[in-house]
């Protein structure tokens, strides 16, 4: 079991496109921002949802089940309480535990866009019929955006979760990422500090991961600064 200190210094982003077909489903901060910007230009109706996924690491089903009452604008916190599975809203997230996710400035702007678009409906991201969205709804807009950017592969909605989780693990203690993503803290030994990170700690880690860097292009790549406790949080965890 690895012991955790204050976490490694952030490493500069390495573009996954440079890794070819061996690349993992992880985007660098620069790539993520570029994709979101191009999506806003080409398919603005899907930008709020995409930007929220990029900046929170939510599963698509968790975002699809969000309601206005799940957002605390004053505290800048999003409460994950439900999940969509096969088109049906489930009473708890996939992990079975509700959690609070901090909102950085980009996520707040995305939510403002979502609130304008929902036209009084309960769900923040409803379909045209007011029902929960399916993940496949993003396939076509993501494909055209990737084509416009001349990317050899198109990301899926779940890549945002992989990317933010990877970035946070590289700029903060691994249990910060575990709590943010709703993963178990089992198997992590912590010395010298309280294991439960605060909302502000998680918010700071998200901001650093999005703006400073810290993602690697491929799962096999390393630069020698990788946190030795990362494996303790990822082994056996769900997505």
Image (spheres, grey):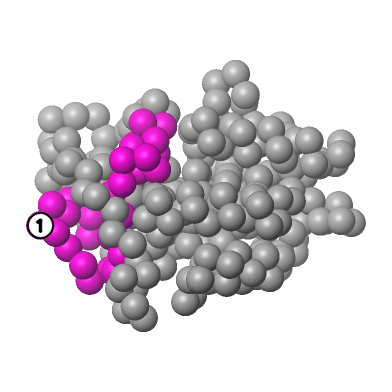
Q: Position of residue 100 (x, y in %)?
A: 51, 35
* Residue 217 position (above or below residue 32): below
Residue 121 in magenta stretch: no
In the rendered image, is residue 5 in sight?
yes
- In the rendered view of the protein, which quadrant contains the C terminus? bottom left
Label 1 neighbour load within 10 Å: few <14, some 14-19, many 20+? few
Identity of the residue drawn at 23% across and 55% down: 230
Q: Main secondary structure of the magenta part?
A: loop
Q: Nearer the viewer, residue 206 or 46?
A: 46
Q: Secondary structure at mark 1?
A: loop
Position of residue 187 in the picture relative to residue 185 (left or right):
left
The residue identified by callout 1 is: 224
The answer to whether residue 178 shows anywhere in this view is no
Question: Residue 26: horizontal and vertical position, in percent?
Answer: 39, 62
Q: Is residue 116 left or right of residue 208?
A: right
The residue nearer to you, when weighing 122 against 216, is 216
Tell me where the magenta segment starts and ends, as one range.
202-231
Q: Where's the N terminus, which quadrant?
A: bottom left
In depth, the one of 105 and 99 nearer the eye is: 105
Q: Position of residue 149 (x, y in %)?
A: 53, 65
Q: Is residue 226 magenta?
A: yes
């Amino acid at each position: 079991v690895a012991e955790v200190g204050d976490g490694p210094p952030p490493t500069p982003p390495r573009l996954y496109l440079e890794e070819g077909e061996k690349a993992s489903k992880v985007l660098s901060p620069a790539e993520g921002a570029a994709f979101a910007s191009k999506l806003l230009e080409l398919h603005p109706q899907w930008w709020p949802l995409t930007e929220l996924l990029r900046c929170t690491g939510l599963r698509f089903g968790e975002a699809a089940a969000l309601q206005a009452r799940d957002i605390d604008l004053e505290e800048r916190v999003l409460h994950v309480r439900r999940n969509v599975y096969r088109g049906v809203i489930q009473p708890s997230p996939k992990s079975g535990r509700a959690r609070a996710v901090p909102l950085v400035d980009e996520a707040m702007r995305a939510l403002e866009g979502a609130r304008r678009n929902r036209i009084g409906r309960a769900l923040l991201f409803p379909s045209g019929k007011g029902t929960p969205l399916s993940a496949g709804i993003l396939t076509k807009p993501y494909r055209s955006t990737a084509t416009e950017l001349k990317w050899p592969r198109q990301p899926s909605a779940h890549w945002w979760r992989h990317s933010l989780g990877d970035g946070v693990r590289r700029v903060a203690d691994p249990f910060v990422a575990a709590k943010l993503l709703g993963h178990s803290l089992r198997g992590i030994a912590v010395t010298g500090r309280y294991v439960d990170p605060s909302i502000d700690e998680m918010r700071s880690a998200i901001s650093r991961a999005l703006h400073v860097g810290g993602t690697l292009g491929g799962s096999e790549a390393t630069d020698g600064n990788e946190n030795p406790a990362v494996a303790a949080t990822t082994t056996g965890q769900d997505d």
